[in-house]
Image (spheres, rainbow, N blue to C red):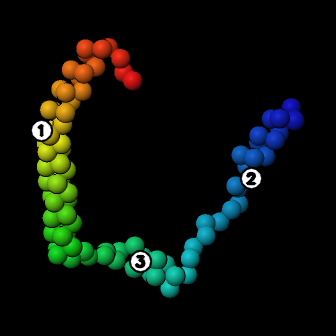
């Protein structure tokens, strides 16, 4: 019974509350901040795109250059290990 009374009290605790309304000046100030959009210059967008393209190009070039050079070294190491089957 006590639990039911507590639940009823909690559910009815918002009865009689009034909605809070901000002053008109504050409301318009908040609305103005929400509605302002920061415009990013197209120059910055192109700069970012060029940077990404450069990074991707460099990464691809490095991956392929390491792959070609390390193939011979890898084959040599593998042939040495396979003869003795020792890793140390």
Residue that badge 3 annotates: 33
Out of 55 and 13, give the one closest to the viewer.
55
Residue that badge 2 annotates: 13
Mark 1 to mark 3: distance in Å?
56 Å
Residue 22 placement, left or right of 57? right
Residue at the image point whose x is 70% and y is 55% from the top: 14
Out of 62 and 17, give the one closest to the viewer.
62
Q: Nearer the viewer, mark 1 or mark 3?
A: 1
Out of 44 and 14, give the one closest to the viewer.
44
Residue at the image point whose x is 74% and y is 53% from the top: 13
Q: Quadrant of residue 78?
A: top left
Residue 15 placement, left or right of 52? right
Mark 1 to mark 2: distance in Å?
74 Å
Mark 2 to mark 3: distance in Å?
34 Å
State whether residue 1 is above or below residue 9. above
Out of 84 and 61, give the one closest to the viewer.
84
Q: Nearer the viewer, mark 1 or mark 2?
A: 1
Q: Nearer the viewer, mark 2 or mark 3?
A: 3
Residue that badge 1 annotates: 68
What's the mark number on residue 10? none
Quadrant housing the C terminus: top left
Badge 2: how crowded within 10 Å, few (<14), some, or many (20+)? few
């Amino acid at each position: 019974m006590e639990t039911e009374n507590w639940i009823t009290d909690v559910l009815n605790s918002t009865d009689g509350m009034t909605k809070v309304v901000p002053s008109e000046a504050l409301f318009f100030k908040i609305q103005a901040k929400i509605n302002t959009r920061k415009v990013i210059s197209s120059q910055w967008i192109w700069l970012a795109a060029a940077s990404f393209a450069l990074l991707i190009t460099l990464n691809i070039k490095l991956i392929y250059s390491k792959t070609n050079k390390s193939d011979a070294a890898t084959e040599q190491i593998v042939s040495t290990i396979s003869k003795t089957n020792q890793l140390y």
